[in-house]
């Protein structure tokens, strides 16, 4: 149990649909980041939120968007799904925005796009 | 950006054997973590080790920041050690992961 929970654990969508993935962080962890992990690859940074504002983004198109809420939960939204969006999506939280902090990951949401 | 390379990409061990996994990075870092990803996808923190040596049971890690590499040692391997091991370094607010080492420990 890492204190970071994600839902759903698995889901299947079709191309063109939209999906919302959810993450609940540990209390006091006001920084949350999302990663995409394609099969056989290392996780890739999507974006980070700090105090409900996006403050860093990786090389992902605008159809990947997010929200962070005051209760330490967050969402990743992906519009107009493509086949290549099939991946494990990981949420990670940390108590602070910068510095030498350890990220704690959830178990992930595995998305399959058909 | 920083490049992270891990070796070997795959490793098969007999239970009880020892192993060393390597992580090279292209620039100086002040934050390096080792993770174990189990077959269900969960990334488990093993070590936060920007420099020096740490040990936790059968696992230990050493980072030589000036030479831009880190090593993860697994001694007396067990079948439960199987999975993918990632190292990751921090650049700004994000972690940059290597491609991982997939370890399979046979009984």
Image (cartoon, rainbow, N blue to C red):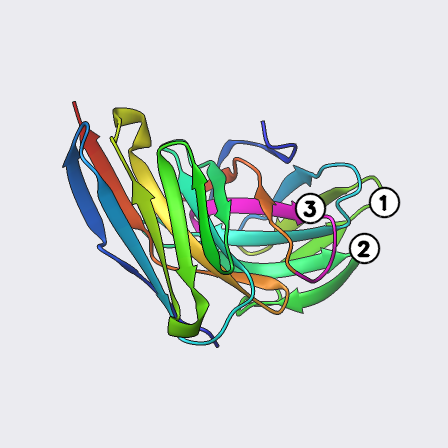
Residue underneath mark 1 = A70
Residue underneath mark 3 = A75
Q: Which residues are magenta?
A: A81-99
Q: Secondary structure at mark 3?
A: strand
Circles 3 and 2, Cβ within 8 Å, touching? The answer is: no
Q: Count every numbered label the image shows and give the total.
A: 3
- x, y percentage for residue B91? 56, 69
Nearer to me, B8 or A77: B8
Circles 2 and 1, Cβ within 8 Å, touching? The answer is: yes
Residue A112 shows in this picture = no
Chain letter of disc 2?
Answer: A
* Labelled disc at residue A52: 2
Marks 3 and 2, Cα distance to the nearest angstrom?
Answer: 11 Å
Nearer to me, A37 or A62: A37
**Residue B44 among those drawn in magenta:** no
Label located before the other in sequence (2 or 1)? 2
Label located before the other in sequence (3 or 2)? 2
Chain letter of disc 3?
Answer: A
Q: Residue furthest right?
A: A70
Label located before the other in sequence (3 or 1)? 1
- x, y percentage for residue A111? 47, 41
| Quarter of the rendering occupied by the C terminus of chain B | top left
Quarter of the image where one finds residue A72: top right
């Amino acid at each position: 149990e890492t204190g970071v929970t994600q839902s759903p654990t698995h889901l299947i969508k079709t191309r063109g649909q939209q999906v919302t993935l959810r993450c609940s962080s540990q209390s006091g962890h006001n920084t949350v980041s999302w990663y995409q992990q394609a099969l056989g690859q290392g996780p890739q940074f999507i974006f980070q939120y700090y105090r409900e504002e996006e403050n860093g983004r990786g090389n992902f198109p605008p159809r990947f968007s997010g929200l962070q809420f005051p209760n330490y939960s967050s969402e990743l939204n992906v519009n107009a799904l493509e086949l290549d969006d099939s991946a494990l999506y990981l949420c990670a939280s940390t108590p602070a925005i910068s510095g030498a902090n350890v990220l704690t990951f959830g178990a992930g949401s595995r998305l399959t796009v058909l | 950006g920083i490049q992270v390379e891990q070796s070997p990409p795959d490793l098969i061990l007999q239970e009880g054997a020892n192993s060393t996994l390597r992580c090279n990075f292209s620039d100086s870092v002040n934050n390096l973590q080792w993770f174990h990803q189990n077959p269900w996808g969960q990334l488990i923190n093993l070590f936060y080790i920007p420099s020096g040596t740490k040990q936790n049971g059968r696992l230990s890690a050493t980072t030589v920041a000036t030479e831009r590499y880190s090593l993860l040692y697994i001694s007396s391997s067990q079948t439960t050690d199987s999975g993918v091991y990632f190292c990751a370094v921090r650049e700004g607010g994000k972690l940059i992961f290597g491609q991982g080492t997939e370890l399979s420990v046979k009984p």
